[in-house]
Amino acid sequence: MERTIAGKTIAVNEEGYMTDFSQWDEKVGEALAAEANLTLTPRHWEVLKYLQTEHKNQVALSIRRVGKSGVVDIKEFYALFPNAPLKTATKVAGIPKPASCI
Amino acid sequence: MKNLVILGAGTAGTMMANHLHHELKKPDWQITIIDEREEHHYQPGYLFLPFDIYEPEDIIKTIEEFIPKDVTLLKQRIERIVPTANKIQLSNGNEIDYDVLIIATGAKIAPEEIEGMKGEQWQKSVFDFYTFEGSLALRNKLREWDGGRIVVHITEMPIKCPVAPLEFAFLADSYFKNKNMRERVDITYVTPMSGAFTKPKATEALEHLLQEKNINIEGDFAIEHVDNETKKIVDYGGREIPFDILVTVPTNKGDDLMERSGMGDDLNYVPTHKATLQSKEYQNVFVIGDASNIPASKAGSVAHFEAEILTENILRYVKGQPLKEEFDGHANCFIETGGGKALLIDFNYTHEPVEGTFPFPGIGPLRLLKESRMNHMGKLAFRWVYWHMLLKGTHIPFVSATMSEKGKVYS
């Protein structure tokens, strides 16, 4: 399905995650963050860029991995993206929701 | 003579010994299996022990009785694998060379990963049921407990048998009903996932069952520590859940041997090609069961399906033929739902569990993703199948290693 984010037509899935990362830009990121009631600070951007790089390198993301990344610890990750940080942060970053392992 | 060495004589390693001894024979091949333990445990039985459904003797046998006579069983602790030299170093100082290595060292709980989990309340009010000792301690506690708040909790994924904690919650509901004390017990299911299971369709069915049984669900809970004094679990966001009994599934990790050998990822699982089961780093090393990092369930049924495909791939490897990229992540699990009923799910890497019939399309007799008594009989019968067919590598009739899409309802 498609929706309009920051004036652009963007492909998303039923849960609102972007399905085509090439459509993402910082304006889109800011709009998605606003929908999650977040105002992005430089620390948010560092974490978002890290997640995007990991995704590009096909690394399976988990809270544990983010916590050990050296970019942010789990406590701060929660402070930046409250409640379900990995789900919120990946949505804002324009990358797929991490598949929890089976 | 060439050497094939299997590390670990649990479900997966034992099955490989039984498959391969028919194929790789003396004088060309010597098969050796190494495990320091004496006993083989039927791990699915740990779920039933706390509720007095099984007794310890139902789930424990010796390792020896399942290892074929022409396979050498070494009961030694393994110090290190040296994959660059094709060698195994034992703790007694001996070394064993291999031509082909199969890693089947499994996964185990690591409660020390979470602050306070293995604290002063460990096995007093904080329990696991993924070890024999934990499960037995929990049985003794439940026998004398007269009610309160019981919290069933998953620390982080992946875990062995991802449906086991749900089954525990369902069986607890039944158990307390039978003891006429259900109204004095509050059951809460706490998970780091958003819902009851990892796959959407099954989650829907399972959450319906949780509601029906009056079990609360708390999702998206990433535990930070266990507070032993106030008896609460606390997550990174500051959310607190109080308990009188905490039944937790701690972090699961591969064997420490992988860390000592520099062969594991951050949870000590061995990077493995998900369709061939060959190690990603060493061509003559193969990985089966819970020890690998493949995105399939960590379950005996998965190891069973893997074993059929891995046997063929090892024979191809020793003949210098290309490996078959055949493993599809097939898993097949009974889910006890209490009250003498069970669900059955069948899925793989790409297809989530759906409704339908199994193993015969349109006939069954087992129903997929629906509660039935027949499914429960299947689960109980499975213990017999495990000891008498599965470990011996006997093919289970009508159930193929790769998943069948027949008789299933895909929308």
Image (cartoon, coloured by chain):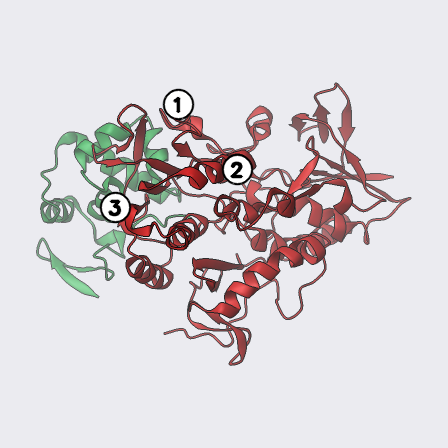
Chain colours: A green, B red
Q: Quadrant of the N terminus of chain A?
A: bottom left
Cα distance, mark 3 to mark 1?
A: 31 Å
Marks 2 and 1 on same chain: yes
**Up/down of B244 relative to A102, above or below:** above
Amino acid carrying label 3: it is Lys
Residue position for label 1? B119
SS at mark 2?
helix
Q: From the viewer's perspective, tell me whether residue B364 is left or right of residue B249.
A: right
**Up/down of B338 relative to A68, above or below:** below
Cα distance, mark 2 to mark 1?
A: 18 Å
Furthest toward the bottom, the residue is B362
- Residue B136 has which mark? 2
The spot of residue B84 in percent (x, y) is 67, 29
Q: Label 2 is found on which chain of the structure?
A: B
The spot of residue B310 in percent (x, y) is 66, 52
Label 2 crowd (10 A; few <14 / some 14-19 / many >=20): many
